Amino acid sequence: MPLSTETITLPPAGPGTTRRLTVLRFKSNQPGPKAYVQAAVHADEVPALLVAQHLREKLITLDAAGQLKGEIILVPYANPIGLTQFLQGWHLGRYELDSGSNFNRGYPDLFEPVAAAVSGQLGADAAANVALIRQALRVALPAEYSSNENMALKQHLYGLSCDADVVLDLHCDYEATMHLYIGTPLWPAAADLAACLQSSVNLLAEDSGGEAFDEANSRLWWRLAKHFPQHPIPPACCAATVELRGDRDVSDTLAAQDADGLIAFLAGRGFVDAPVPPKPALLPEATPLEAVDSLSAGHPGVLVWSVKLGDEVMKDQVIGHLIDPETGARQPITARTDGLFFAARGHRWVRPGHWIAKIAGRQKLDWRKAGALLSN
């Protein structure tokens, strides 16, 4: 079927300020699963916006050739509020300026109404249980959307994605290698996504805290499985946050490469009538999110690195310096774990408490506590 375009109007924050979402639906006559892909819910993470455009064109071509199966929803910009937020020329798209809330936190948690709705109706058939839970999810969505623009945006995005088999939330970091955030129960089944995107770091957590968009979609499934242990409930939503390197990694070459990787992943999951990519000879590694060390600045200063992103570093290795412009003192920045230096702060002037580097280790760190594992 031809691509259909839906427009969702958000409640106005004031006179003359109505904003809208554009939703692209590719729905095939061929039966198949449902995928949902959204770009830049952190609205200043521009690589996602460009990857979505390349993905749009590839999906249009595949759709015209009759090669799509099931349903694919693409939201090419997931945050019209954040896209408009500039302060003296600086784009501020991570937090809503009005409330200070993170656009990728606080998504609906429908565990309790869904658990209540399916209690006594689950059986021994896992597929039937999945269908029952998805129906309960759709029923549990609010009958009316919030009058608050930001909350209504989150309700709409979740409503579009909550019953999908695959949910991909496209982001980026300040400066980073390609990496993924994935629910622990989804690994190693989600290694195909990591392989198709050539992800260097794959970060696992059952609950990273804050109800981020991907976990709002995926975590419900293993919570229900624990709540109803006598019934088979698989982790039926493969949801991931895809970090498309750094915020300046914006090029048609990279975006086309990443869109090709997403198409290859979707083909392997049954959404595209095309050759399935071969499974990787070596399974991509995964890192517990509790093993990721986030280093912070101890004083204001100029940030200088002596290692490169993607380098393996050793515990106690000096990986850079923080230079005090008043005294000239150079405070060494020391790795606290062995691992991969995969993300760094983009701006080179930092204040005390700013996170400045992330190192993906292999062993859980004592100071990393479950439930509050994501940076704000």
Image (spheres, rainbow, N blue to C red):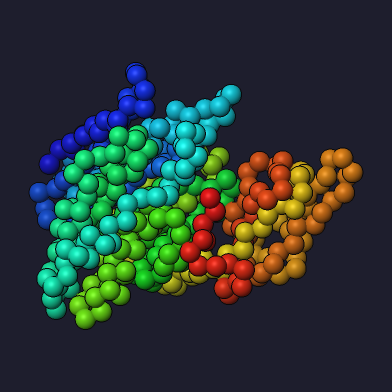
Side (left or right) of 310 relative to 57? right
Query: Which residue is rendered at x = 41% and y = 38% of the image?
Result: 49
**Residue 359 or residue 8, whichever sits in front:** 8
From this view, report whether residue 295 is shown above or below residue 149: below
Q: Picture coordinates of residue 183 (x, y %)? A: 40, 65
Residue lying at the far left in this picture: please name it. Answer: 29
Is there any visible trace of residue 202 in the rendered image?
Answer: no
The total number of labels drawn is 0
Side (left or right) of 304 relative to 99? right
Q: Picture coordinates of residue 105 (x, y %)? A: 43, 49
Query: Which residue is rendered at x = 26% and y = 65% of the image?
Result: 236
From this view, report whether residue 44 is shown above or below residue 213: above
**Residue 335 or residue 100, whichever sits in front:** 100
Residue lying at the far top in this picture: please name it. Answer: 16
Side (left or right) of 153 relative to 24? right
Q: Picture coordinates of residue 238 (x, y %)? A: 32, 61
From this view, report whether residue 277 is shown above or below residue 9: below
Q: Picture coordinates of residue 264 (x, y %)? A: 32, 55
| Quadrant into which the N terminus falls | top left
Residue lying at the far right in this picture: please name it. Answer: 327
**Residue 29 or residue 33, whichever sits in front:** 33
Query: Which residue is rendered at x = 13% and y = 76% of the image?
Result: 123
Query: Which residue is rendered at x = 70% and y = 44% of the image?
Result: 350
Is there any visible trace of residue 6 in the rendered image?
Answer: yes
Side (left or right) of 154 relative to 373? left
